């Protein structure tokens, strides 16, 4: 069956006063990002619902797929619309809908009516009973079951009349843009795209920073991160990706600091730089893909020393997850295949054979003093030479 309209349900928990507007406006904006590649939709709010309508019927699967990436949506209902509210007109549209959507099927049903338009001359119960009778007359092979119907035919009388019986679950979460901004440290690995997805799901708008180390990391490694950012943008909306040339800073650390402290010191400089771009974008938190105990730099001691370099909160949504749980999400959101492409990463190139797993902050800070004469200049150079790439999902 072809559809030209969708009713979007969202969870209303905690939505009061001004928050409701912010939530709905963000939802509409994100729906536009998702639906623009599918076709031209008119998206509008109407008393606790959002509708997406189009002049022509676009591909159903494609439309539902696009909407299923919009956080904040709890249910997607393909609907048919009756312009007229008279009983005969509603009954005609409803029967056409049943004939087409359930052609050749036998089932029990119930008509369920909701009136947004309280001036309607019949009660919801009366409308439901009358329409139920009409459906039964038109399709005598069907049966009514008001307790456990196989199909609930829902008729919502609002500005117009909306008819539906199917609800495809949405992704849940909150619309991106309702919960501030954060800066994601996005590598080419499996974990950080998942971390970005998870934070975006809580309504946070994300931008990203990638530390590139040419010529040790190739253009292909950079392209891989751009591709990952595009995939995350399917859910998170447009992302500003800062590509920071990290080579000189890494080289300086490599030459001047103890080899076993290289990773941890490098991670601290990543934090300083990420925070600089975070402030530039009005972000109030950093996001990484770290998971406790996964590698040497992800012990509790290492995370403590890393966090000391940041003044903003650092969100690590993967912190308590096993690798296979993170992989499961990366497969679901479509980043896994890209993440496992075998391109070099700036961290793996300079990594020591036996990195410290329990760094001490005072020791690390002392080692960092060895960078004193060069680091300010190198940092300035890295910040000023960063490239910003605007990433769109499509
Ligand atoms: P990932 O799979 O996300 O790369 P990982 O398990 O490989 O994570 P690390 O390489 O230790 O772990 O990196 C930990 C986190 O630090 C990453 O999740 C990411 O947030 C950040 N990070 C690491 N390398 C980079 C990089 N080159 N650019 C930006 N962020 C990075
Ligand atoms: Mg990595």
Image: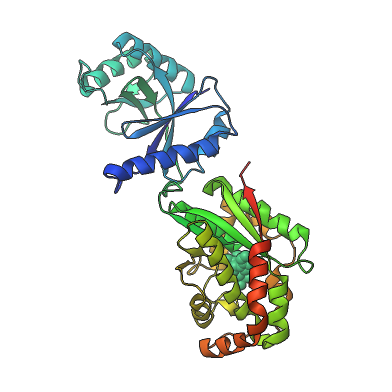
x and y percent of residue 351 in the render? 70, 79
Q: Nearer the viewer, residue 288 or 313?
A: 313
> Is 66 located above or below residue 211 in the figure?
above
Q: Nearer the viewer, residue 142 or 151?
A: 151
- Residue pictured at 55% horizontal, 55% vertical: 207
- Residue pictured at 57% horizontal, 90% vertical: 366
x and y percent of residue 365 in the render? 56, 86
- Residue pictured at 52% horizontal, 61% vertical: 278
Instruction: Report the residue that reaches farthest toward the right.
Output: 215
Quarter of the image with the C terminus in it: top right
- Residue pictured at 67% horizontal, 73% vertical: 378
Q: Nearer the viewer, residue 117 or 162?
A: 117
> Is 126 located above or below residue 194 in the figure?
above
x and y percent of residue 304 in the render? 49, 79
Q: Quadrant of residue 146?
A: top left
Residue 208 in view, yes or no: yes
Residue 195 in view, yes or no: no
> Is 72 located above or below residue 359 in the figure?
above
Q: Quadrant of residue 88?
A: top left
């Amino acid at each position: 069956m072809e559809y030209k309209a969708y009713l979007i349900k969202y969870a209303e928990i905690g939505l009061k006063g001004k928050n409701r507007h912010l939530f709905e406006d963000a939802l509409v904006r994100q729906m536009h990002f998702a639906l623009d590649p599918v076709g031209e939709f008119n998206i509008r709010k109407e008393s606790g619902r959002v509708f997406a309508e189009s002049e022509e019927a676009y591909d159903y699967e494609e439309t539902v797929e696009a909407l299923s990436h919009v956080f904040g949506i709890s249910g997607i209902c393909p609907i048919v619309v009756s312009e007229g509210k008279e009983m005969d007109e509603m009954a005609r549209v409803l029967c056409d809908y049943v004939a087409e959507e359930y052609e050749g099927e036998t089932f029990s049903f119930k008509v369920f009516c909701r009136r947004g338009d309280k001036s309607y001359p019949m009660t919801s119960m009366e409308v439901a009973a009358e329409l139920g009778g009409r459906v039964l007359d038109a399709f005598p092979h069907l049966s009514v079951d008001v307790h456990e119907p196989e199909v609930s035919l829902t008729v919502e009388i609002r500005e117009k009349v909306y008819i539906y019986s199917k609800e495809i679950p949405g992704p849940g979460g909150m619309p991106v843009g309702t919960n501030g901004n954060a800066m994601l440290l996005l590598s080419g690995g499996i974990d950080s795209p998942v971390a970005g997805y998870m934070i975006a799901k809580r309504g946070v708008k994300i931008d990203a920073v990638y530390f590139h180390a040419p010529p040790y990391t190739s253009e292909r490694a950079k392209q891989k991160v751009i591709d990952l950012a595009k995939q995350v943008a399917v859910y998170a909306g447009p992302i500003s990706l800062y590509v920071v040339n990290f080579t000189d800073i890494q080289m300086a650390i490599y030459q001047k600091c103890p080899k076993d402290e290289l990773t941890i010191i490098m991670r601290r400089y990543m934090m300083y730089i990420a925070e600089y771009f975070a402030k530039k974008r009005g972000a109030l938190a950093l996001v990484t893909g770290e998971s406790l105990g996964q590698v040497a730099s992800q012990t509790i001691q290492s995370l403590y020393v890393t966090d000391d370099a940041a003044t903003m909160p650092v969100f690590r949504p993967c912190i308590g997850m096993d690798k296979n749980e993170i992989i499961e999400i990366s497969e679901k959101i479509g980043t896994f295949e890209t993440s496992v492409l075998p391109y070099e990463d700036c961290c793996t190139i300079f990594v020591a054979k036996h990195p410290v797993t329990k760094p001490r902050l005072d020791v690390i800070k002392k080692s960092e003093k060895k960078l004193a004469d060069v680091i300010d200049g190198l940092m300035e150079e890295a910040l000023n030479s960063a490239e910003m790439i605007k990433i769109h999902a499509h």
